[in-house]
């Protein structure tokens, strides 16, 4: 038995035992990481350089790309280093930092996606008031609120999680440090504080989810009332990328945190963790650029100059 004061490092879950498979996973993660850096980097550069894209929708997309880069950079470099050097170890401080920053970027991204649904609601349902309701100052304040909420959520969970006595060893059943896996190492009797904090966070997340659903109900009602088919198609096209990113983010995250323990297994947890932590940051730029003609045109202009 050990406690948190005597733990100097944690052992992360290995993807494979053979050296060949470890190197295969290294190259796979490297390809995904480079794709995420390239895709999000291009979106950030394009929006920053093209003044036609200095609108609320692209401002929030710019913030989303920064969050995606932050979240994937929190976990993949360490995983790739472990694959390359055939190790599973991560220091206590490194694990705490990884948990904090991943929770921070993940929480902030959810809050930002909620704000982006409001942006689409105003653009489609109240187009004449778009400039008033979503001025530059308001957009900066809303983005700052998303980042701040993510920061304080991560700070509370990280401080509370690592204040619990870790009496079940130091083997983490995941390829990175996340709250559910660290909680498994603590005494069952000490879960009450974190459970209460999770309930508060889940309640706040549910309010955001209801807000998103209500926003899109209003959006769909407004779109269906547009007389021309071309107008309806254009309105839907501005919402589909956000809906696709939101669906990918929420569905995978909900499965991770709400799936029954009876179907839980290390291999399933590993696959789902990759789906919700690694895949979205890499595919979000592709999702947004494929359906967005303005962004595609600006990106093409940037690459040909």
Image (tube, rainbow, N blue to C red):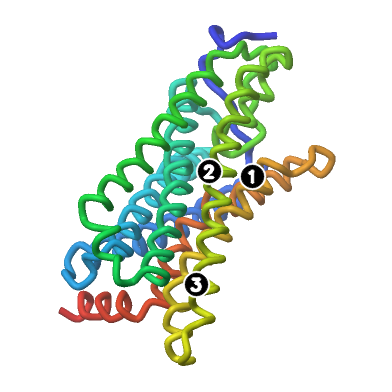
Quarter that holds the C terminus: bottom left
Above or below residue 113? Residue 148 is above
Q: Which mark is residue 229?
A: none
Q: Pick the residue in front: 302 or 231.
A: 231
Query: Upstream in the sequence, badge 2 or badge 1?
Result: 1
Query: Upstream in the sequence, badge 1 or badge 3?
Result: 1
| Nearer to us: label 1 or label 3 | 3
Residue 126 lies, in percent from the top left, at: 37, 68
Q: Quadrant of residue 205?
A: top right
Give neighbour class at mark 2: few <14, some 14-19, many 20+ (Cα, 10 Å): many
User: What's the residue at 72%, 12% (across, down)?
Assistant: 189
Contact check, label 1 and label 3, Cβ < 8 Å:
no
Residue placed under numbered mark 3 in the picture: 240
Give neighbour class at mark 3: few <14, some 14-19, many 20+ (Cα, 10 Å): some
User: What's the residue at 38%, 48% (across, down)?
Assistant: 67
Q: Pick the residue in front: 125 or 37.
A: 125
Residue 14 lies, in percent from the top left, at: 63, 39
User: What's the residue at 54%, 38% (across, down)?
Assistant: 204
Q: Secondary structure at mark 1?
A: loop
Residue placed under numbered mark 2 in the picture: 83
Query: Residues under labels 2 and 1: Cα distance?
Result: 8 Å
Residue 184 lies, in percent from the top left, at: 69, 25
In the rendered structure, the answer to whether residue 131 lies left or right of residue 81 reads left
Residue placed under numbered mark 1 in the picture: 15
| Nearer to us: label 2 or label 3 | 3
Contact check, label 2 and label 1, Cβ < 8 Å:
yes
Above or below residue 257? Residue 305 is below
Q: Quadrant of residue 168?
A: top right
Query: Residues under labels 1 and 3: Cα distance?
Result: 34 Å
């Amino acid at each position: 038995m050990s406690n948190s004061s005597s733990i100097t490092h944690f052992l992360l879950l290995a993807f494979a035992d053979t050296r060949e498979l470890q190197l295969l996973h290294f190259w796979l993660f490297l390809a995904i990481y480079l794709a995420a850096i390239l895709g999000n980097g291009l979106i950030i550069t394009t929006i920053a350089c093209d003044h036609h894209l200095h609108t609320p929708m692209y401002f929030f997309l710019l913030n989303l790309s920064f969050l995606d880069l932050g979240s994937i950079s929190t976990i993949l470099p360490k995983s790739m280093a472990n694959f390359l050097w055939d190790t599973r170890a991560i220091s206590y401080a490194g694990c705490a930092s990884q948990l904090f920053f991943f929770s921070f970027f993940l929480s902030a991204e959810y809050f930002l996606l909620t704000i982006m649904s409001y942006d689409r609601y105003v653009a489609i349902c109240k187009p004449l008031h778009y400039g008033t309701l979503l001025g530059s100052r308001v957009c900066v304040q809303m983005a700052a609120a998303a980042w701040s909420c993510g920061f304080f959520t991560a700070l509370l969970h990280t401080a509370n999680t690592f204040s619990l006595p870790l009496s079940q060893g130091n083997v983490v059943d995941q390829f990175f440090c996340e709250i559910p896996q660290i909680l498994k190492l603590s005494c069952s009797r000490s879960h009450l504080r974190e459970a209460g904090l999770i309930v508060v966070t889940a309640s706040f997340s549910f309010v955001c989810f209801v807000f998103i659903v209500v926003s899109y109900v209003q959006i769909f009602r407004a779109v269906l009332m547009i007389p021309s088919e071309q107008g309806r198609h254009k309105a839907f096209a501005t919402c589909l990328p956000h809906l696709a990113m939101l669906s990918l983010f929420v569905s995978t995250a909900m499965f991770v945190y709400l799936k029954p323990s009876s179907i839980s297994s290390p291999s399933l947890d590993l696959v789902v963790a990759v789906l919700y932590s690694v895949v979205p940051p890499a595919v979000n730029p592709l999702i947004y650029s494929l359906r967005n003609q303005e962004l595609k045109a600006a990106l093409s202009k940037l690459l040909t100059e």
